[in-house]
Amino acid sequence: MNGTLYAIKIGAKRGWHEQVLSLKSTQDQTFYLFFAVVTLVYMYVNRNNTVDGLDLTIPQVALPTIVAAAVTFGLIVGPAQQIAMEREDGTVLRVLSAPRGSIAYATGHFVLNMTSLLPMLAVIMLPSVFLFDAGSQRGWSGWAAASGVLVLAFLALLPVGLVIGTLVPDVRRTTTWGILPLLFMMAVSGIFVPLSNLWGWLQAVGQGLPLYWFAHGMRFAFLPEGAAELELHGEWRISMAVVALALWAIVAWTIAVATMRRVGSGVSAASVVTARDTTAQWVR
Amino acid sequence: MNDARVDEQPVILVEGLVKSYGETPVLAGVDLEVRRGEVVALLGPNGAGKTTTIEILEGSRQRDGGHVSILGFDPAQVNDEWRSRVGVVMQSWRDHARWCPQDLIGHIASLHRPYVEASGRRMRSVSEILDLVGLSGQAEQRIRTLSGGQRRRLDVAIGIVGRPELLFLDEPTAGLDPQGRREFHELIHALVDDDNTTVLLTTHDLDEAGKLADRILILAGGRIVANGSEDDLAASIAHEAQVRWSANGVAHVHATPNPTTFVRSLLTGPDGDVVTDLLVSRASLEDTYIELVTRHEAGLGPSSVFKEAS
């Protein structure tokens, strides 16, 4: 157990180091800049529009949903791509061939993706909060509720990204394995169009997925009580959101741990070798 | 080889190792034994199964059959303590491109530290290791900007960070220029002298095998077809001569211990009239190696000759 704790500590350092490298890399800076610009343009264009019947602007109503969508994108596509790539370039094999390397590797990804929430939230929220008065309309209790929802959503979504990255056959296929299901989830979770505009069975599918509840929880935290009329059934279902996200977290982590264990065993170190060979062929 | 150590259990013991990829057999019963402190080269052409063998021994690939014992353990079922005793340097790693050598060596070293210290060995500091492999000048440079030779030395640095008793090196000098190759050979010699490390390396270069290894194993046609020091191998085939000739525009080579008899039967045989350019020469070690490999690969079937099995 002592050894496990020690490996977790080394893994946390690894994750932090990866985060520092990520913030210094042009590629990742471009990624954040993209989210910042898209959000800013949308907010600016809609800055004077208000929502019918409510004393709220479009940026105020849209911000919690945009935060949920962007964070979900980062937590699923991010680790899926990182792990798929690290399986191919030998990073996984290198770390796993050190003693207790699998624990350090998994912890590293936990810390890297947890700390990635900060720059992601900053680029999306700071301009909107300061320029368009978006953000919590419920004062400090709203910010606190938003933090709680974020933690739950992080726990529910990160394992999904980890599993995709562990199972995807090669890095080029993270698009079909990661981005397409993600776009589907967004489509049925009220990100692009309100859920009430969809067929009943699609509404049911959406409410079985974590993103709907993440976005619902964020809107609950940021918007005043009266904005509930925009929601399905016209009410806030915050305890339902907590239960749904917690259930997703438990189930997804169980699957993620089992999947990553398999990768840690001898059998899949071989698949790491195979993956590396496959890329070597393509790169050449 | 080392009579004083005959009673000691071998560091590597492999018996009847079998592996195929789909329908293609790669290893058809490999037997080998490496004792503590030996430096052994596994020599063979591309596709002979050298990488496959070494990956099975280091526990990153599963075998189809046969017995394998590395430091007394089956590599298919190993624990973390075993991992800390074995160093691995594989081919074509491109990992941790954003990191710098100093941080990566430090990170991997920290994972090994509890095991190394528990066994009473002393960890080398990161700067000591950087010095040893000659990367002190690149300590804080991005790994992706290192040259091929620097990259290989970093791989070795990480391979030896846990002061392993056994080090696997897969094609360690592939892609290095002659200068880098020579520096690398010196590095391996220094390591082995320091720690009495057992080394199993693969190479397709006969000259390199002779320079680095105490003993050479030639892998061809899925089996070990020769085993001995460079001198042993040279001596065992020194009596062989090589006969070259052309017949109907096709060049032929044949190695034989008795060239006179062979040439007589060749010239009096059915094709005797069309034989031209006849040349009889003493076989060099390299000629014999190539001849040996060609002969054994032919035995395994034509599909195996040009396929890289790694």
Image: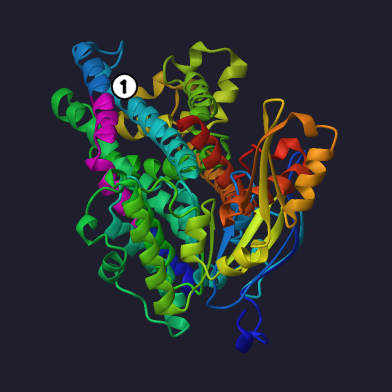
Pinpoint residue B125: horizontal percent, then vertical percent.
29, 72
Q: Is residue B5 above or below residue A36?
A: below
Q: Is residue B132 toward the left or the right of residue B166 in the image?
A: left
Dominant secondary structure of the magenta stretch?
helix
Pinpoint residue B297: horizontal percent, then vertical percent.
72, 45
> Residue A191: in sight, yes or no?
yes
Q: Quadrant of the C terminus of chain B?
A: top right
Badge 1 marks a residue whose secondary structure is: helix
Q: Quadrant of the N terminus of chain B?
A: bottom right
Q: What span is in magenta?
A: A13-36
Q: Is residue B143 above or below residue A95?
A: above
Q: Is residue B277 above or below residue B113?
A: above
Q: Which residue is at a point 66% across and 85% down the rendered structure image?
A: B6
Q: Which residue is at a point 64% across and 62% down the rendered structure image?
A: B238
Q: Which residue is at a point 50% across and 35% down the rendered structure image?
A: A279
Q: Which residue is at a point 56% across and 46% down the rendered structure image?
A: A273
Between A191 and B142, the one lying in front of the other is B142
Q: Which residue is mark 1?
A: A62
Between A234 and A207, the one lying in front of the other is A207
For the image shown, how many numbered marks are present on the structure?
A: 1
Q: Is residue B183 toward the left or the right of residue B69 in the image?
A: left
Query: Is residue A186 shown in magenta?
Result: no
Other residues around mark 1 within 10 Å, as few (<14) / some (14–19) / many (≥20): some
When asked about the image quadrant of residue B216, the answer is bottom right
Pinpoint residue A231: horizontal percent, then vertical percent.
43, 22
Between B234 and B280, the one lying in front of the other is B280
